[in-house]
Image (spheres, rainbow, N blue to C red):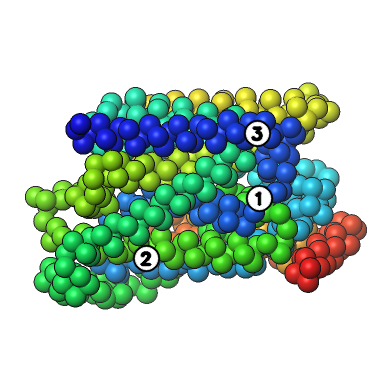
Amino acid sequence: MTDTAFQTIAMLVYFLGMVAIGWWAYGRNNSLDDYMLADRALGPAVTALSAGAADMSGWLLMGLPGALYASGLVESWIAVGLTVGAWLNWRYVAPRLRSYTEVARNSITIPSFLDNRLHDSSHLLRWASGLIILVFFTFYVSSGMVAGGVFFESSFGMDYRAGMVLVAAVTVLYTLVGGFLAVSYTDFVQGLMMVAALVAVPVVGVIHLGGVGATVEAVNAVDPGYWALLGSSTSLIGVVSSLAWGLGYFGQPHIIVRFMAIRSPRETVAGRRIGIGWMLFAVAGAAATAIVGVAAYGRDRAVLADEETVFISLGQMLFHPLVAGFMLAAILAAIMSTVSSQLLVTSSALIEDLLTQLPVAKNASSRRLVLYSRLAVLAVSIVAAAMAWEKNGTILALVAFAWAGFGASFGPTVLLSLYWRRLTAPGAVAGMVTGALLVMVWGNLDGGVFDLYEILPGFLGNLLVACAVSCLTRPAPQVAEEFDAAVAAVAESARA
C-alpha cells in the first residue's frame, strides 16, 4: 500500500468521525438555545479545548512553526501575547460573561447580550454588531475554505476546488446538523489531535537526532543566534505590536461565545486551567517542532523549500504513513474547527440578531428558528464558498485585519459591559465605531508609530470614547440592578 493510500485512510477516518459527532448531536437540538449554545451545559474540558481549537486554526501547526523555523525565537512574541491574552480572557471575561448573559434576558449571542445589557430601545447596537459579525465572518469562513483547498492541493496534489468543496461540505454538514453542540465536541476532538501531534513530532524528532544536546548543537551550527528573543532587526514597536495580539481575545465572538455555554461561572476556573495548559503545550510543541526542523534540515531550501511545511515534512519523515496521515488530519482539524465556529456565529448573527428583529420571524417557534438557523448556515457557507472559488490573497490578508477589527470594536465594549455599570448604549455604539474606524485608518498608514499593530490604538480609542460618551449620557434604570445581580451570581457560584 502506498503512502498516499495510508494517508487517505487516515483522512477518511477523521472525516467520518466528525460527521458521526454531528449526527450524535442532531437529536439534542430542540430549541434555538440548544442549537446556538448547547443549552449552556458544556463541561470545562470541552469548553476549554473548543475555545482553543476555534482560536488557533492552521496558524498553530503551519504559520508559527514556519516563522520560528525561518527566523528563530524572536518570532515567539506573538505566541507570548496570545497566551497572556487567553489567560486574561478566561480570568476576567469568562465568569462574568457566563453570569451576565443569563441575567440579561438569557442572551445567546454577543450582540443580543450588549443590546439586553444596555437596554438599547433603538436596537442600534444589536443591528450594528450583528452586521459587523455577518460581513467579517463571512470573509473569515471563506478564508478557511481557501486554506482547506490549498491544504489538499499541496498535500495530496488534489485540485484546489475539489479540496475546498470537500472541506466545506464536511464542515457544513456537521455544523448544520449538530449546531453548537457538534461544533464544540468536534473542536474538543480536534484540539486533542492538534496538541498530540505537536507534542509527538518534536519528542520523536529529538530522539531521532540523538537527544537534546545533539539537537541544540545542530541548531547552533546552523544559527548561533537562534535562541535570542531580541534581534538586531527587532524594534520596540515590533515587540509591542506582537504582544498586542493578545488584546484581540476580548472581542472575538467565536471564542468568547464558549464562555456563555459552560455549565456555571464556577467551572470557568477549571476551564481556564485546562485551556491555558492546552495552549502552553501547543505553543511549546510548535516552537520545539521548529527547533527540530532547523536541526534536521539546516534551513536548506533544497531539502525544505517552504518553511511553513516543516511540521508536515517532519511528520512524514519520522512516522509510519498512516500516523503521518493523522498528522495531516491534525492540520485539517485546526482549519475546520475555526471554520465551523465562525460559521455558527455568523448564522446566529443572521437569525438571532437580525432576522428575529423583523416582524416575519418575531413570533416564530423554537423549532422554526432552528430550521432558519440551519438554512442560515447553508446560505453563509454557499456565499463563502463562492468567494473562495478562486484563490484570493486579499481574503487571506483580511484575517489578520479582522482580528484587529473585532478586538478593537468588540473587546473594550465587552469589558466595559462586564465591569462598568455606567456604560450606556450611546457610549458603546460610539466606542465600537471609533475602534473600527481607527483600525481601518491606522492599518493603511506606514512608517514610524504607524508601524504599531492597529489593534492597540483602536482598542484604546474605543475605551476613551465609550467612557467619555457614557459619562455624558445616562444608563437605563434597570442596568444597576442587573449589574449587581450578575456580580452576585458570580460570587455565589464561586462559594458553592
Query: In percent of the image, x 53 and y 61: which residue is there?
Result: 275
Where does the C terminus fall, quadrant-wise?
Answer: bottom right
Residue 312, how many percent across, how many down?
A: 26, 48
Residue 168, how many percent across, how many down?
A: 45, 30
Residue 161, how many percent across, how many down?
A: 34, 26
Which tag is nearer the camera, tag 2 or tag 1?
A: 1
Q: Earlier in the sequence, mark 2 or mark 1?
A: 1
Distance, label 1 to label 3, CA atoms, is 24 Å
Q: Does residue 350 show up?
A: yes
Which tag is nearer the camera, tag 3 or tag 2?
A: 2
Residue situated furthest front in the rendering: 1
Tell me, for residue 284, which label it has, or none: 2
In the image, what residue type sits under mark 2?
Ala
In the image, what residue type sits under mark 1?
Leu
- Give the residue at mark 3: 350
Q: How many marks?
A: 3
In front here: 175 or 208?
A: 208
Which tag is nearer the camera, tag 1 or tag 3?
A: 1
Distance, label 2 to label 1, CA atoms, is 27 Å
Q: Secondary structure at mark 1?
A: loop
Q: Earlier in the sequence, mark 1 or mark 3?
A: 1
Q: Is residue 422 above or below residue 251?
A: below
Location of residue 212 (image quadrant) = bottom left
Q: Is the residue marked by circle 1 packed among few (<14), some (14-19), or many (20+) residues within 10 Å?
A: many
Discs 2, 1 touching: Cβ within 8 Å? no
Q: Is residue 385 above or below residue 132?
A: above
Q: Secondary structure at mark 3?
A: helix
In front here: 63 or 158?
A: 158
Q: Is the residue marked by circle 2 packed among few (<14), some (14-19), or many (20+) residues within 10 Å?
A: some
Tell me, for residue 42, which label it has, or none: 1
Q: Is the residue marked by circle 3 packed among few (<14), some (14-19), or many (20+) residues within 10 Å?
A: many
